[in-house]
Amino acid sequence: MMTTALKICGLQSVEVLKSMINLPVDYIGFVFAKSRRQVSPQQAAGMLQVLQEWEIDKIPSAVGVFVNPDLEELEVLLQEAKLDVVQLHGQESPQFCREVKERFPVSVFKAVSIESERPEMERLSALQSYAGCIDGLLIDTYDPVYGGGSGRTFAWDLIPPYQQWAKQQGIPLFVAGGLDSDNVTQLMDQYAPYGVDVSSGVESAPGVKDINKVTEFVERVKGI
């Protein structure tokens, strides 16, 4: 049985990262967009150095979270911090996503905010234009201020059409938005997404990751 992929997002502390070395985490996310979890390229590079020193079979992939960056900004940042994935949370066009893929040695994940008020057909037709332009899809709760990272769940019954679209494209679907160790099992049982993405659900205070909460979340997701 394939286990669910796991992404811990919004890391800011080298100490927390070091304490995660024995946990089976697949992706570690660094937020470069304006947010209480924002890090500088230099901070991310320092944490990436720690990751590279881990003597384990599979080092987690490094993901950078951006909102409407331009190519020059990405170029400068990627020289400083060698990311594996660029995750785009803004209004980036399919063309921009394709340009990032072609220009840099990274995968591109597109995040989509789920607004339950918006008609499903409208949401999915907007997604259609990204076919062939992205390597992964992440769905998150709509947040008018930050675009995502709200710490709230959305109506999970809206997941299946996105899951179907991602499957047709042959790309992974990640679910984010208000996940924690209390509700992630229900999400996996009901919808079995390729991956889950957690940030505020493993924090003791806004932006402060709690290694005990991280460990508990990982145990729930990975069944260990």
Image (cartoon, helix red, strand yellow):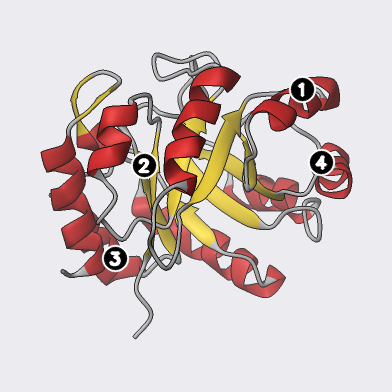
Of marks 1 and 3, the one in the foreground? 1
User: Is 170 drawn above or below residue 130 in the view shown?
Assistant: below
Amino acid on which the number 4 mark rests in the picture:
Val
Instruction: Measure the alpha-carbon separation of dots 1 and 2.
Output: 35 Å
Of marks 2 and 3, the one in the foreground? 3
User: Is 135 drawn above or below residue 207 in the view shown?
Assistant: below
Residue with the most extreme bottom position: 1
Instruction: Measure the alpha-carbon separation of dots 1 and 4.
Output: 13 Å
**Residue nearest the observer in this picture, 110 or 13:** 13
Q: Residue under circle 4?
A: 100
**Residue nearest the observer in this picture, 131 or 1:** 1
Q: Which mark is residue 154?
A: 2
Please tell me how crowded label 2 is: few (under 14), some (14-19), or many (20+) other residues with Cα within 10 Å: many
Q: Secondary structure at mark 3?
A: helix
Please tell me which residue is depicted at 81% across the width and 51% down the height of the picture.
129
First in sequence, mark 1 or 2: give its number: 1
The image quadrant of residue 28 is top left
- Are the residues at dot 1 and dot 4 in contact (C-beta closer than 8 Å)? no
Amino acid on which the number 1 mark rests in the picture:
Val
